[in-house]
Image (cartoon, rainbow, N blue to C red):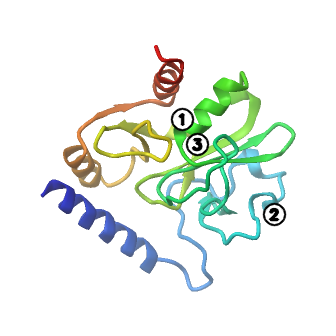
């Protein structure tokens, strides 16, 4: 029953969001800045491919859904999960999940500072990319993520009742970016 209520709530939130889309096709901005400072000198074309735009980092359009993960090589098939990172040489990397991003970083000995910027899909909006430090990470065995680690990134400033309903429908724990990175690194290492 709680899962049904959550699905209805998410569905209503997504349909409201779709109805608020401006006539010119622009997605209304949440609390993200128009263009994150770290993206101002990177061509917006770097984020787009022949795949239609599916996500937004501020107002920068990002082709993510339907692309292939730079860690697993698998196609990004969920709009509620994924990540994008810009390396210091301005290469754009795409990931199917938080865990794929973290495992890529671990395998290559990388840290946040090794990227110009990292954006992770907000599970609730399913369209907006946010910096990892701005998100909370919900771990629940009842809410599978594409990489298999049960991690969902959520905007902590989303509607409190929606966040509560997600917690009720999918009981689990909530963590910071550093905590979830540590958890995923230990999980991968088998600790």
Residue 109 appears anywhere in the view: yes
How far separated are the C-alphas under marks 1 and 3?
6 Å
Element carrying mark 1: helix
Residue 49 appears at what percent x and percent y? 76, 65
- Up-down relation of residue 13 to residue 34 (above or below): below
How many C-alpha atoms fall within 10 Å of the one at disc 3: few (<14), some, or many (≥20)?
A: some
Please state if 111 lies on the left or on the right of 133 as rendered. Answer: right
Residue 120 appears at what percent x and percent y? 56, 46
Q: Which residue is mark 3?
A: 131
Name the residue furthest left: 1
First in sequence: mark 3 vs mark 2: 2
Most foreground residue, 33 or 68: 68
How far separated are the C-alphas under marks 3 and 2?
20 Å
Residue under the point 82% across and 46% down:
91
Give residue 133's mark. 1
Q: Which residue is mark 2?
A: 45
Residue 25 appears at what percent x and percent y? 60, 80
Q: Quadrant of the N terminus?
A: bottom left
Q: Quadrant of residue 106?
A: top right
Please state if 159 lies on the left or on the right of 180 as rendered. Answer: left
Residue 111 appears anywhere in the view: no
Element carrying mark 2: helix
Residue under the point 53% across and 36% down:
99
Labelled pair 1, 3 in contact (Cβ < 8 Å):
yes
Residue 128 appears at what percent x and percent y? 54, 57
How many C-alpha atoms fall within 10 Å of the one at disc 1: few (<14), some, or many (≥20)?
A: few
- Up-down relation of residue 190 to residue 153 (above or below): above
First in sequence: mark 1 vs mark 2: 2
Most foreground residue, 172 or 26: 172
How many C-alpha atoms fall within 10 Å of the one at disc 2: few (<14), some, or many (≥20)?
A: few
């Amino acid at each position: 029953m709680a899962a049904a209520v959550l699905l209805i709530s998410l569905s209503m939130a997504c349909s409201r969001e779709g109805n608020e889309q401006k006539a010119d096709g622009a997605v209304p901005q949440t609390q993200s800045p128009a263009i994150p400072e770290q993206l101002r000198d990177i061509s917006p074309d770097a984020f787009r491919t022949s795949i239609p735009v599916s996500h937004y980092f501020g107002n920068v359009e990002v082709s993510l859904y339907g692309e292939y993960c730079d860690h697993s090589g698998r196609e990004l098939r969920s709009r509620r999960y994924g990540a994008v990172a810009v390396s210091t040489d301005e290469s754009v990397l795409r990931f199917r999940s938080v865990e794929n991003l973290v495992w890529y970083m671990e395998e290559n000995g990388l840290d946040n500072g090794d990227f110009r910027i990292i954006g992770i899909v907000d599970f609730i909006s399913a369209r907006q990319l946010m910096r990892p430090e701005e998100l909370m990470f919900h771990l629940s065995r009842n809410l599978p993520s594409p990489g298999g680690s049960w991690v969902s990134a959520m905007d902590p400033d989303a509607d409190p009742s929606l966040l509560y309903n997600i917690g009720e429908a999918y009981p689990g724990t909530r963590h910071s970016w550093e905590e979830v990175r540590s958890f995923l690194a230990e999980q991968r290492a088998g600790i």
